[in-house]
Amino acid sequence: TAETSAADADTILIHDDSASALRKMTRSNFLSGVGGDNTPAFSATLSGNQSCNDSTQSVIVFNSEHYDTDSAYDTSTGRFTVPSGEGGKYFFAASLRFNSATSNRNALDIVINGSGSTQQVAFESTGAQYSSIGGAVAMNLSAGDYVQCQYYQTSGGAIEVRTDSHFSGFKLIGV
């Protein structure tokens, strides 16, 4: 009869590739390496508005975490660092909202290792008061690489990034 559940210590019988032999293993061994949980993962926001100067590439330091499964996000630098043994493909999303973004150019980048590979996830050629930009990107990272959000604007003055801005990411499984 077909079973709908199994305990970790239960033995499971399977056929090998040729279907000529039965093999057995415990449920816990059978499921190791199958599936996953999309970690490390984090989500962060700003605890207060952050001012960004005109014609300057500014790192946005999301200093308040919703969660951080592997303590890989640093709220003092705005960096997510890939933990040892966790290299692979990652998905990141970011959104910025502004108090007054009357800028000729707004650009949101997710940057690897400070000045390495840059993935522009959002670009807006004209801004409006209380506007926002956001985007997402998947990228391949190695252990020790770090990513952070950077923002560039040309308004002629400082622009405030609001507290309802977000940055999050997680490791993709099975890719």
Image: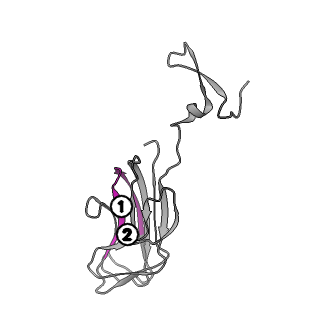
Q: For this view, does 156 lie left or right of residue 93?
A: left
Three-letter residue code for mark 2 = Thr
> Does the magenta segment cover residue 125?
no
Judged from the image, the secondary structure of the residue bearing numbered disc 1 is strand
Q: Secondary structure at mark 2?
A: loop
**Crowd tier of the residue under label 2, counting other residues whose Cα lies within 10 Å: few below 14, some 14–19, many 20 or above:** few
Q: Main secondary structure of the magenta part?
A: strand
Label 1 is placed on what type of residue? Answer: Val
Query: Where does label 1 land, which residue?
Result: 147
| Residue at point 40%, 61% (across, down) | 80
Image quadrant in which the C terminus is located: top left
Range drawn in magenta: 134-152
| Marks 1,2: beta carbons within 8 A | no
Mark carried by residue 77 = 2
Depth check: give the residue in front, 19 or 155. Answer: 19
Placement of 78 over or under 129, stated as above or below: above
Task: Please say if 25 is above or below 145.
Answer: above
Packing grade of label 1 (10 A; few <14, some 14-19, many >=20) is many
